[in-house]
Image: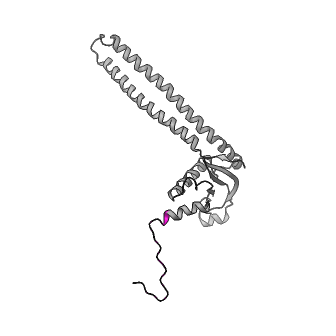
């Protein structure tokens, strides 16, 4: 199976930059909305028609409305770019899993499940002290658990169609390297495993034992008080 993108630092970075621009424009839009509301309030509170007909008042209101319209267009453009990036990343994964799962849905893994697995594993490994260099090559595999039911029912129930996946961490993120149809039985535990290289395992040990010194083994017959 060809590698299918699950996560991508490059695409995530592009989405984050767009979100930053969206946040800034949204703040500007909020300021303009308050400005428009202020002008409209002045219009309603005006005791006569002199104020609304004032050229400066009219110009200010038109300028604020025009700015809001321009910002709306810019925001929609950035959001559309975000949706396009997200779709370009997710669609191949969705198509791959749809081919594997067929019509089965109840106990299978979806694209969002696989993305969650990748991000969860990334967080787990980083929290254990992996370096960005040594995390590359790590793999995680998963087959979901079976549905829960009484033992009496479980003894009679047939297996359910599910999905077994295997992901690998590469330089840019996680890739789906294997996805196949599998079966899970009622009350069967999930099958999940994480595999890392020796250098990555050394990262775990180094962090876990940081600040801990190993004392020499006492000689036989020597008591330690």
Q: Is residue 173 magenta?
A: no
Q: Position of residue 197 (x, y in %)?
A: 62, 60
Q: Is residue 212 magenta?
A: yes
Q: Residue at x 51, y 39 (%)?
A: 16
- Count of numbered marks: 0
Say left or right for 14 vs 36. right
Q: What secondary structure is the stretch in magenta mostly built from?
A: loop
Say left or right for 171 vs 38. right
Of residues 102 and 86, the one drawn nearer to the viewer in this rendering = 86
Above or below residue 8? Residue 76 is above
Can residue 143 be seen here? no
Of residues 44 and 159, the one drawn nearer to the viewer in this rendering = 44
Which region of the structure is painted magenta? 207-225
Of residues 27 and 185, the one drawn nearer to the viewer in this rendering = 27
Q: Position of residue 152 (x, y in %)?
A: 62, 66
Q: Position of residue 158 (x, y in %)?
A: 69, 60
Q: Position of residue 87 (x, y in %)?
A: 61, 38
Above or below residue 169? Residue 68 is above
Above or below residue 122? Residue 12 is above
Say left or right for 38 vs 127. left
Q: Residue at x 49, y 85 (%)?
A: 219
């Amino acid at each position: 199976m060809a590698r299918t993108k699950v996560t991508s630092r490059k695409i995530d970075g592009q989405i984050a930059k767009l979100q930053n621009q969206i946040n800034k424009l949204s703040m500007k839009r909020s300021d303009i909305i308050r400005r428009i509301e202020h002008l409209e309030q002045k219009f309603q509170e005006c005791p006569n028609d002199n104020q609304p007909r004032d050229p400066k008042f009219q110009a200010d209101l038109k300028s604020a409305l025009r700015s809001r319209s321009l910002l709306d267009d810019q925001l929609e453009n950035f959001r559309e770019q975000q949706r396009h990036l997200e779709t370009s990343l997710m669609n191949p994964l969705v198509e791959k899993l749809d081919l594997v799962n067929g019509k089965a849905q109840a106990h299978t893994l979806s694209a969002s499940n696989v993305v969650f697995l990748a991000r969860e594993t990334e967080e787990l490994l980083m929290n254990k002290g992996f370096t960005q260099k040594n995390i590359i090559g790590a793999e995680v595999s998963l087959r979901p658990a079976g549905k829960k039911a009484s033992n009496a029912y479980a003894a009679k129930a047939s297996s359910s169609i599910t999905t077994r996946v295997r992901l690998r961490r590469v330089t840019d993120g996680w890739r789906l390297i294997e996805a196949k149809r599998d079966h899970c039985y009622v009350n069967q535990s999930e099958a999940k495993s994480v595999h890392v290289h020796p250098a990555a395992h050394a990262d775990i040990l180094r962090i876990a034992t940081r600040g801990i010194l190993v004392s020499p083994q006492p000689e036989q017959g020597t008591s330690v008080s």
